[in-house]
Amino acid sequence: MTIDIFAAVLMGLAGAGHCIMMCGGIAGAFAGRVNTFQLLTYNIGRIVSYSIAGALIGTAVGSLAGFAQNGLIGLRIFAAFILILFGLYLGQWWFGLRYLERLGQPLWRQLQPLASRMRANHSYPMLFSAGMLWGWLPCGLVYSALSWAAVSGSATNGALYMAAFGVGTLPAMFAFGWLSHTLQQFLKSKGFRQIMGAIMIVYGLWTLIIALRQLHLIN
């Protein structure tokens, strides 16, 4: 579980450039208009939604896997492949995860007007609620993290994993309004994204090897 938590934070940090491109417009809308605590409240709402999603998928998939021998190991192999695919996506070598993002767009089109109205109200309860809606924005990065939450096997572990992932995304989103244009461009640059993508691929391969060893398929 400790290794999985580390992986979750790493995924969030590695996706900094992706977060800025996907959510920069949302975060940038707050620059200079809200204080630090209001921005933090908004992001905490987003992380809470991630945790709820992690708890749900951890419970559902964990229960199903419990009926099959080596079920969780099989799920870990699946998650390893998702991590490799995410690395390819992050490094801009393969864009298949965009199809997953498109699946969630109809729901987001329904939620977005409500989220915008809530965001316009700078009270803490409304900002927290708007952040929770933001957490359901279609995102290949989030979907990749959820594949790991599924491996956790329980609601608690799934929630913890997605909370850790959310914390990993926090620096990029929380500091968006304060980052220099040069640093933003660096985080979005092809070179940075490819380095982070390569790290994700290596981590996914390492996870895959461990799972295959547990099944005694390799030495």
Image: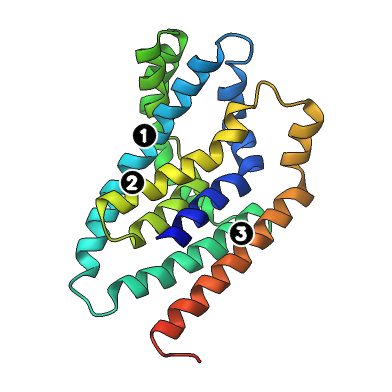
Q: Amino acid at mark 1?
A: Val
Query: Residue 145 at x, y = what percent?
Result: 45, 52
**How dense is the environment of label 1, judged by Cα within 10 Å: few (below 14), some, or many (20 and up)?**
many
Which residue is tagged 1? Answer: 48
Along the horizontal axis of the image, is 121 left or right of 154? right
Residue 50 sits above or below residue 174 on the image: below
Residue hosting label 2:
159
Residue to which mark 3 is pinned: 87
* Contact between labelled residues 2 and 3, with CB atoms less than 8 Å apart: no
Task: Identify which amino acid the numbered label 2 is placed on.
Answer: Ala
What secondary structure is marked by label 3? helix
Residue most extreme to the front? 2
- Against 114, residue 52 (above or below) is below
Q: Is residue 23 above or below residue 127?
A: below
Figure coloring: rainbow
Quarter of the picture holding the N terminus: bottom left
